[in-house]
Structures are given as C-alpha cells and as structure tokens.
Image: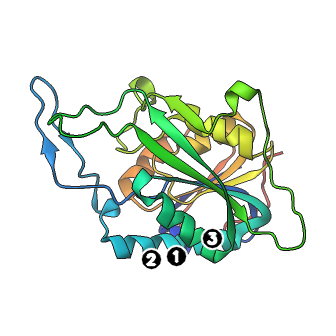
Amino acid sequence: MHYLVLGDALQKTKLIDFKVDTAIVDPPYNTANKNTKILKGRKARSSDFGKWDYFGDEEYLIFTKNWIEEVSKKLKDNGNLLIFCKMEYISDIKRIYENIGFKHHGTIIWHKTNPAPQIRKNGFLSSCEAVLWATKGFDNTKISYTFNFSKQNEMHNFMESPICMGKERTKHPTQKPKRILSHLINIFTNKGDWILDCFAGSGTLAEAADDLDRNSINIENDKEYFKILAQRLEKLKNKKILKTGKITKSKSKK
C-alpha cells in the first residue's frame, strides 16, 4: 500500500494512526540561493530551488527539530531514521535528534559522480551529500533494529552514483536516484514494512518501495511536485491519494 498525501509534513504526519518501521527523509537542505550561472552553449544553471528551501540558520534548525519530533512519535521503538542532509549540517542535525532521544549509528556519504561543474573554479565541486542514520535511544532494554547486512563490498558507509538523468529525471531540482533509495530500503527495512517519507518530492521512495514489496507514506506540500509524484506513481495499483483524513494501516500490502 502506498499513501500519496498532499499537505504540510508536520500536520499530515500527525494524522498517521499507527507506527511505521522506518523513516527515510530527504528534507529541505537550506542551500538555495538566487545566483544564476550562465554557461556558454548550455542552459543557465540556478540554485533557486523555490521558497521551500529558504531559511535563516536558526529558523532551519527549529524547523528540523519540529519535523523530527513529529516523525519520532510515529516511529516504532526499533525503527530506523535516515536523513539526507548537506555536509555542513551533519553536527547540527545529529545534535537535534540526540537531544530528542535518538542514538546516532552512522553517517553515510553519497558521492555524485557527475556533480555540477565549478564554473568560477574557486572552490571544490559539491559532489557529496550525507545520510544520517539513527534509532531511538535504548536504556536498559535491548531492542533490535532492522539492519540487513549484505556482502562486505556492498556495505561501505559510502554510496556512489550519478545524479538523476535520462528517463528517470523529473522536474524536481533535488531528486534522489532510485538506485540510492533502493540500496537504503534493502538494508534498513524488510518486506511488508511501512516507510515514511514526509518530504516526498517526486516520489522516488514510493517507486523503489513498491519494487521491493514495502509499503510507504509519501507526504508532499508543493502542489506542482505532488502532481509530478502522482503522475509518476500512476502505474502503482495499490495506492491511495489523500488530501484529508487519517492515514490508516487497514489496507497494508502483504
């Protein structure tokens, strides 16, 4: 079962009436700017992703704390939390979820093999992003979280892939590759599990989850991106589009 939910991440997460197994979240990075790079013979490149990615630093950390608190309430005691973020915010986000009660387990680096070029040649290419992995903190009781260890050479804390290109690419500016989401889903969830993505973007997680026989809740606030998401996931048979009402487990996929 896949819920496609239009609305605010915090408000819609509150409407989930059961506990999910894992949250894999790609929130705003607070990295957008108004600069536009003019490329000779190519389309101009802009980092003005939209108003959803503009925050002051303090405002961004408050926003991050608020959504992590809401996700925590809907995550099982043995649930995994995975957060995509830019490198500069690793320590801040880690500190936020540890204060809420999560235990940090690791930082995974995603290396983009085809990052945007450095036009001015006055700094490094932005070729790496982070994925923070945490579980709810355990006191005196040991609770086993899901971690499916594969072959040694597939379990590095380093993932490498190009950014989305070709037929996979949508108009969403920060779309993550399906290959990366599938890798994380295989490691941190089991078949039949429920995965929450409260910043669903263009719906990559739902598509990958369906391929791997997982269920998902996908919340997206932007109407244009939700339209892209809904069209992309139109082929999924076991889905439900929600704009109002509670999100229930009654029709979970086996």
- Identified by mark 1, the residue type is Asn
Badges 1 and 3: C-beta atoms under 8 Å apart? no
Instruction: Identify which residue is drawn at 43% across, 25% down.
Output: 167
Tell me how far mark 1 sits from mark 3, CA to CA: 14 Å
Quadrant (top left/top right/bottom left/bottom right) for the C terminus: top right
- Identified by mark 2, the residue type is Ile
Is residue 236 in view from this perspective? Answer: no
- Please state which of residues 110 and 200 is positioned toward the viewer in this rendering: 110
- Please state which of residues 238 and 110 is positioned toward the viewer in this rendering: 110
Instruction: Identify which residue is drawn at 43% across, 40% down.
Output: 128
**Residue 217: horizontal and vertical position, in percent?**
63, 56
Instruction: Identify which residue is drawn at 48% across, 66% down.
Output: 92
Tell me how far mark 1 sits from mark 2, CA to CA: 6 Å
Left or right side of 144 for 228: left
Disc 1 versus disc 3: nearer the observer: 3
Tell me how far mark 2 sits from mark 3, CA to CA: 15 Å
Badges 1 and 2: C-beta atoms under 8 Å apart? yes
75 w.r.t. 122: above or below: below
**Residue 15: horizontal and vertical position, in percent?**
63, 73
247 w.r.t. 120: above or below: below
- Please state which of residues 208 and 247 is positioned toward the viewer in this rendering: 208
Label 1 sits on residue = 66
Badge 1 density bin: few <14, some 14–19, many ≥20, Cα 10 Å? few
Is residue 58 in view from this perspective? Answer: yes
Residue 160's tag is: none
Where disc 3 sits, the SS reads helix
Numbered circles on residues, count? 3
Q: How is the image coloured?
A: rainbow
Label 2 sits on residue = 62
Label 3 sits on residue = 98
- Identified by mark 3, the residue type is Glu
Where disc 1 sits, the SS reads helix
